[in-house]
Amino acid sequence: MNHLIVTHPRVEKQLSTILLEPELLGELKHQLNCQFEGLSIVRVESDPGNGSSHLLHAIANQLRHVGSSTAFFQFKEGDSFINLTSYHLNNLHNAPFVFMDNIHHILATAYERDELLNFLQLVADNNGTFIYSCATEESLDNRLRIEKPFSGPSLALYLKALNREDKLKWAKKLLDEKTVEELDQALFDDSLSNANFLTSLAPYIEQQATEFGNNYALMRLQEEALHQLEIRMLRTQLAILELEPKKNEIIRDQQYEKAADIRQEQRALADELEAIENELASLSIQPKPSQKAMNLYIHSLKIENCLNANKKAFLTAIDTIKVKLEEINEQKKELTLESEKALRQRVFKDSVNWTNVLERYSIN
């Protein structure tokens, strides 16, 4: 088998997430309430993109929700029904409801078709209800073959593209009124399939979710981008702090060629900070109602504030350490043999500790 064609209906496919004409939805809910009592065949017909597969999954999920047993087959091009041995079928023909989506993929050859019809005969013998989807242009001969084993009443559900009025109502459920008013009217054309209609709305739905702080997929990407920017910023700041004492030492030794190299490194680090700023600005993180979005915004502000603060004074830490060391050196000059032992120990210990701190910000 090319893929597992005996499967469970997809749980995200529900009646609440499918576009249906109100009259059809009402009839379907009625049939579901009585669990298609008395019906042996339910045929779902539609042109491509109008929701036949979605509806089949939704019906199966609804029946499973109320405790009914179902068998669900979903076929794709290239699948072979004859590869389904008795082990695969596992008495699935005994289920009260048997579903087959895209059944036309199994009707291409006579041998495959015969195996399928043998299985459907077992479903009919067990008084099961067979629910399947087919294209509107499916040949009458194929329909007769499929439904021949079943002697009970049948029901046909015809799915077509929603009309302009229903498409407009659906758009208003997904988008705010102002956005709907700005949409291209061609999106509501009666000939546009339901799938293409939803695909056309997707960018507007995503944009609205972003504005309302509910676009969690985008926020996860932004959160990761912020994390990477923060790491780069901290590394760059550390490199700048480490570079300064090295530059001062080289200048004192009048090694001017090496000093020129240091200045080149400083320019490269400054360019890196500017690149980080530009990438942060490109994320376009703004305060939004959701807590998740606000956390991202606060995180971005922290990075931005650090960048701005270090524009003015990267070397505050170095300067503080140097001042402290100068104070300790002055204290050392004042020490004599008569000074208290504890005082001498404390001064020399402070000298060692602050010298070690300075070395952490220096390049060996």
Image (cartoon, rainbow, N blue to C red):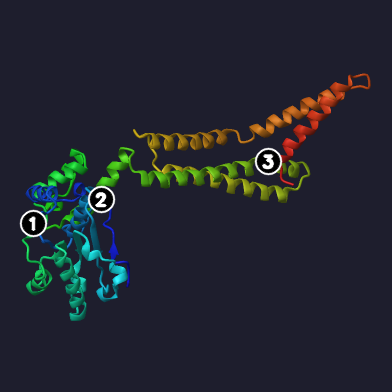
Identify which residue, 208 or 41, lies in the foreground: 41
The residue wearing badge 3 is 244
Q: Which residue is drawn at 21% across and 39% down?
A: 176
Which mark lies nearer to you, 2 or 3? 2
Q: Which of marks 2 and 1 is nearer the N terminus?
A: 1
Q: How crowded is mark 3: few (under 14 residues within 10 Å), some or many (20 or more)?
A: some
Residue type, mark 1 in image: Gly
Residue type, mark 3 in image: Glu
Give SS at disc 1: loop
Q: In which quarter of the image is residue 282?
A: top left
Q: Is residue 261 above or below residue 309?
A: below
Q: Earlier in the sequence, mark 3 or mark 1?
A: 1
Identify which residue, 178 or 43, lies in the foreground: 43
Q: How far is disc 3 from disc 1 in space, using C-alphas?
A: 87 Å
**Measured from the top left, where is residue 340 in percent x and y?**
89, 19
Q: In which quarter of the image is residue 7?
A: bottom left
Q: How far is disc 2 from disc 1 in space, using C-alphas?
A: 40 Å
Residue type, mark 2 in image: Ala
Give SS at disc 3: helix
Q: Residue at x 81, y 27 (%)?
A: 329
Give SS at disc 2: helix
The residue wearing badge 2 is 202
Q: How far is disc 2 from disc 3 in space, using C-alphas?
A: 52 Å
The residue wearing badge 1 is 38
Furthest residue in direction front, as rendered: 126
Q: In this view, does 174 lie above or below 125?
A: above
Q: Which residue is drawn at 60% across and 41% down?
A: 237
The mark tally for this picture is: 3
